[in-house]
Amino acid sequence: MTASAPITQDVLTIPRKLPEGGKTNLVGLTRDQMRAALIAAGTPEKQAKMRVNQIWQWVYHWGSRDFAAMTNLAKDYRALLAENFVIEVPEMVSKQVSADGTRKYLVRIAGGHEVEVVYIPEEDRGTLCISSQVGCTLTCSFCHTGTQKLVRNLTAAEIVGQVMMARDDLGEWPEPGQGTGENGPRLLSNIVLMGMGEPLYNFDNVRDAMKIVMDGEGIALSRRRITLSTSGVVPEIAKTAEEIGCLLAISFHATTDEVRDKLVPINKRWNIETLLAELREYPRLSNSERITFEYVMLKDVNDTDADARRLVKLIQGIPAKINLIPFNEWPGAPYKRSDWSRIEKFADIIYKAGYASPIRTPRGEDIMAACGQLKSATERARKSRAQIEAEAGLTPEA
Ligand code: SAH
Ligand code: SF4
């Protein structure tokens, strides 16, 4: 029996080759990987770069899934592609639409696993919340995903595939001959890596997927429209700045190590001081503006005036925005949402200290689409409440 919460990134990986017919999925390959794959399939080396450019545009700009439609490629080359490759995105198994317009998709990936993807329309933007893992190896005691036992890393194809699937559903690929789709507002304008999983424990696949999404010849989302949320995997933070360059959000949630150890157990490995030291470097390394500090409001756990004051003191000097998240309750959760008046008081202290302190309005509550509630239906091997509390180091009386 292991007593303490596992802080591990041991997860299953699956090979890139699809079992069926041994064809390679072109989705999720970086430009270099695609070039190598095309050469291996018989494309002359001299032509490979140009072929990548052409195929890239079809797949990521026009949203094409069919080699036969790639009319600027010779017929026999299209046949060669079809023999060796597929263009495959995860399958949408269900879609729920909330009264407020939020869409929650259940998506099936290889191995019969399922992950959730949420689309949140707002006045000035449309945000897609995507997942990076099935479940999560970390065990934050307030998070539903953290109670899911089975975990595997998503491939780059499965991460980009979530974005492509959402664009399919929103009907957002440009029509051939009708301009580039860059004019006018986008339905899917922002991405947050705030679904299931710890993105920095699947760094390479997340990086490759975001590079594909940011590529100017394809989906072309700016790095400033992508926010990666991490529980605080300190050694990967500088790499995120250097290799992805997106905006960063931190699941901060507590102002003392004692409380954060219980809420976000990775704090036992990298504590508040270590985390903050690393965060101070992020804006310079990534040439980006503010870091978002996410703070889940848990009744009588982390929501006092003293917490609010400690919070602003701790982050002093870091360009920051504090995002207060009213706790989204789930069946068996060992916490309650702070009262609304408490959340407002907390927000007020932060605001008066000079920080933006938006309270995240719960969206899609009627379809359980809110942060931290995502958990695939097929993997409901839920830990017991007692087990969650034990792993969080909460005593039964707490
Ligand atoms: N693993 C990453 C990203 C996914 S979680 C991370 O932890 O940052 C996205 C955000 O939702 C995190 O800030 C997480 O702490 C928060 N969250 C998790 N469960 C929640 C819940 N039940 N209510 C409100 N926020 C929650
Ligand atoms: Fe994993 Fe994030 Fe949930 Fe913690 S909050 S268990 S890191 S998904």
Image (tube, helix red, strand yellow):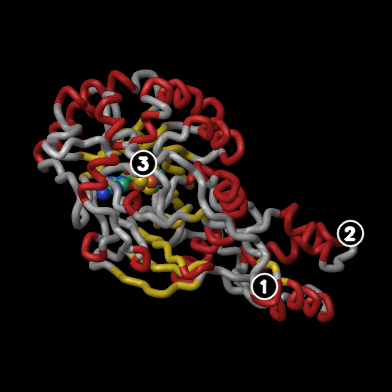
Q: Amino acid at mark 3?
A: Thr
Q: Is residue 389 visible?
A: yes
Badge 1 crowding class, 10 Å Cα cut-off, few under 14, some 14 to 19, many 20 or more, is some
Mark 1 = which residue?
A: 86
Going 44% across and 20% down the picture, which residue do you hit? 277
| Residue 59 figure quarter | bottom right
Mark 3 residue element: loop
Residue depth check, mark 1 versus mark 3: number of the one nearer the observer: 3
Mark 2 = which residue?
A: 45
Mark 3 = which residue?
A: 2
Instruction: Give percent across and percent down for residue 54.
Output: 75, 65
Q: Give the CA distance from mark 1 to mark 2.
A: 21 Å
Instruction: Give percent across and percent down for residue 169.
Output: 45, 72
Instruction: Please state if 108 lies on the left or on the right of 173 as rendered.
Output: left
Q: Amino acid at mark 1?
A: Val
Going 28% across and 37% down the picture, which residue do you hit? 263
| Sequence-first disc among 1 and 2 | 2
Q: Quadrant of the image for the N terminus?
A: top left
276 shown above or below 39? above
Instruction: Give percent across and percent down for residue 279.
Output: 45, 26
| Sequence-first disc among 2 and 3 | 3
Instruction: Give percent across and percent down for residue 270.
Output: 42, 27
Look at the numbered disc 2 and say if its residue's Cβ is closer than 8 Å to ligand 1: no
Badge 2 crowding class, 10 Å Cα cut-off, few under 14, some 14 to 19, many 20 or more, is some
Count how many numbered circles sit on residues in the image: 3
Q: Give the CA distance from mark 1 to mark 3.
A: 43 Å
| Residue 41 figure quarter | bottom right
| Sequence-first disc among 1 and 3 | 3
